[in-house]
Amino acid sequence: MILDRFRLDGQVAIVTGGGRGIGRAIATAYAEAGADVVIAARSEDQLAETADQVRALGRRALPVRCDVLERPDLEHLVEATMDEFGAIDILVNNAGGSPPKPALRTSEREFEMAFRFNVSTAFLLTRLTVPRMVETRGGGNVVNISSVAGREHAPGIVAYGTAKAALSFMTQELAQDFAPKVRVNAIAVGSIRTEALGSVLTPEIEADMVALTPMGRIGEVEDIAACALYLASPAASYVTGEIYGVNGGLVGLNMRLPRAFADD
Ligand SMILES: NC(=O)c1ccc[n+]([C@@H]2O[C@H](COP(=O)([O-])OP(=O)(O)OC[C@H]3O[C@@H](n4cnc5c(N)ncnc54)[C@H](OP(=O)(O)O)[C@@H]3O)[C@@H](O)[C@H]2O)c1
């Protein structure tokens, strides 16, 4: 049955940023497909809610308080997963983000922080996790949550866009490094209705975004979870080093941000 290839029965997945938004939707999608899920984020109340949703789907959940910017937290995340489940099959590097900001008001520190949050933390966690995948299961896969901002050029978003472009390229590099045992793919996410997007949405910005999006709507977290399930599942066993766009058909950013030297 072709649908059986989309199942994750008996697998163990780590999802960073799994307390809400896209990460929560991926965690519950994986549970629905049969995986046990380790959820990492800083807010324990949100982790507990996601864990309850995973358990309600009949799977085991391990919420782990973790700040991905702290190396000891990442080491603890991997150890806690091994202690609880004894194996790792899937890693989703989802925690990330950085608000739009004009280039000339972006400090060197903010630029480096965007890179660290979106790229270096994903690199480190991947480095810590992949050997365990190979030792315990003979292989596995990584899904990185990138952005359409790392693909389409636009003003006003240099730190985030550059960082997500690096995350996408790192995905392709690591896919070459780790084949044939570990697949590495990414999703170039468009505008998805989450708390993070909500912080920049006004009714005017939302109407503009919808008008500039070929599919004519803001995306829902399940749009991303469906792709993340495909990429992590045996259905994608011949897919590695790909950056899948899930963004309503965007060929440019759907947010108009000012240029540094625009007249108005
Ligand atoms: N929503 C969009 O339109 C959109 C578009 C393109 C790309 N993306 C990407 O999608 C990913 C998820 O975004 P989202 O919209 O779902 O955001 P969100 O709703 O704000 O959720 C972010 C999750 O990450 C966790 N998190 C934040 N900082 C963390 C840290 N230092 N260590 C560990 N966990 C941390 C948050 O929990 P705590 O705060 O409790 O730690 C939360 O669980 C990001 O990589 C983002 O760049 C989103």
Image: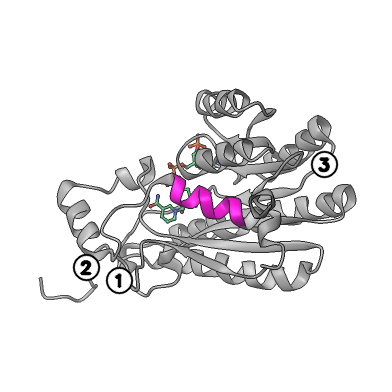
Cβ atoms at labels 1 and 3 below 8 Å apart: no
Q: Disc 3 beta carbon < 8 A from ligand 1?
A: no
Residue range corresponding to the magenta coloring: 222-230
Q: Is residue 96 visible?
A: no
User: Which amino acid lies under the numbered mark 1 shown in the image of this protein?
Assistant: Pro
**Residue that mark 1 sits on:** 155
Is the residue marked 2 within 8 Å of ligand 1, measured from its CB? no
For the residue labelled by badge 2, is the local secondary structure a helix, a strand or a loop?
A: loop
Kind of residue at disc 2: Pro
**Magenta-colored segment: predominant secondary structure:** helix
Of residues 26 and 121, which is closer to you in this image? 26
Residue located farthest toward the right when viewing the structure as drawn: 135
N-terminal-most mark, 1 or 3 = 3
Q: Is residue 138 left or right of residue 192?
A: right
Quadrant where the C terminus lies? bottom left
Is 48 drawn above or below residue 93 in the view shown? Answer: above
